[in-house]
Image (cartoon, rainbow, N blue to C red):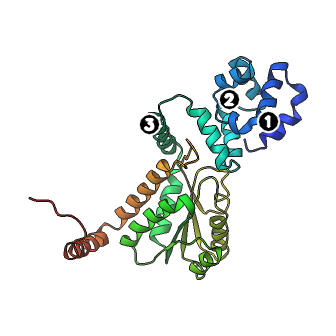
Amino acid sequence: MNRDILASIKNEMSTFSKGQKLIANYILNSYDKAAFMTASKLGKTVNVSESTVVRFAAELGYDGYPAMQKALQEMIRNKLTAVQRMEVSNDRIGNHDILPMVMHTDAENIRQTLEEVDRGEFDRAVQAILSARRIYVMGVRSAFALSSFLGFYFNMMFENVTLVHTNSSSELFEQILRIGEGDVIIGISFPRYSKRTVKAMHYAKDRGATVIAITDSEVSPLVEIADHALLAKSDMVSFVDSLVAPLSLVNALIVAVSRQRSEELAGTFGKLEQIWDEYETYEKTED
């Protein structure tokens, strides 16, 4: 259900019961916190029952509270400042043990990504990469860690890879200046979405390139530009972006592409082993 949930709450305020109005007012005033509360916690916060919260979600037209919560999270994910993220995460973590909470959250993100990823889109993205004249990989800020990882391995597989890396918009467009038909650009961005990445993908699309997006949600601004969209959960635990599920998806993409180029890669790695040995790239273990 893609609509403005806050506008819906305001429009239907007069139809709500007393308890539902308490929920509505809390969401309108503190949607950044409400979006990450369970139905039980939201009910306790405004002094109503959990069942009242569930009925409130149904009143708004959602299949259940999780659907309403997801709509809230998608609406605000790109709006939260770093300070708000810290406030929300501190509220969510509370007195919980941080290590297992973070790791369980990351594991859940991978599980949900595996369940929801579009296998057809994944396979089509692999084929687009394999047939590309040139491959451009870009991600800025925290997403650069993912684009760098992807670019590192693609450079071993292909001779036609450009890892776009710059903090300057003008330099970014200089690096993709000649992109065109037959080329592929892989844009990676998660909330808060990078304007530079979105603009570069628009430019590539206008020039006739195939656009692959690696992002978190159907409402991501990258999805509407992309020919192929690969979605991975990135639920935040703090002001830190959780990139575990996206990295796992990138890893799967690398493996899928490499399987299609196994013969070429065998020769490439044979040469690389000689170079690594000659220049002592790695520590050698004693036999």
Q: Which of marks 3 and 2 is nearer the N terminus?
A: 2
In this rendering, the label closer to the viewer, 3 or 2? 3
Which amino acid type corresponds to the residue marked 1 in the rendered image? Answer: Asn
Q: How crowded is mark 2: few (under 14 residues within 10 Å), some or many (20 or more)?
A: some
Tag 3 secondary structure: helix
Q: Which of marks 2 and 1 is nearer the N terminus?
A: 1
Q: Which of marks 3 and 1 is nearer the N terminus?
A: 1
Tag 1 secondary structure: helix
* Residue farthest toward the left in the current orientation of the protein: 287
Q: Marks 1 and 2: in contact by CB < 8 Å?
A: no
Q: Name the residue under label 2.
A: 65
Task: Tell me the distance, in whole angstroms, between the alpha carbons under discs 2 and 1.
Answer: 19 Å
The label on residue 29 is 1
> In this rendering, is residue 223 above or below 279?
above
Give residue 102's position: percent from left, percent from top. Answer: 48, 38
Give residue 161's position: percent from left, percent from top. Answer: 46, 75
In the picture provided, is 105 more to the left or to the right than 68? left
- Report the quarter where the C terminus lies: bottom left
Tag 2 secondary structure: helix
Give residue 195's position: percent from left, percent from top. Answer: 67, 64
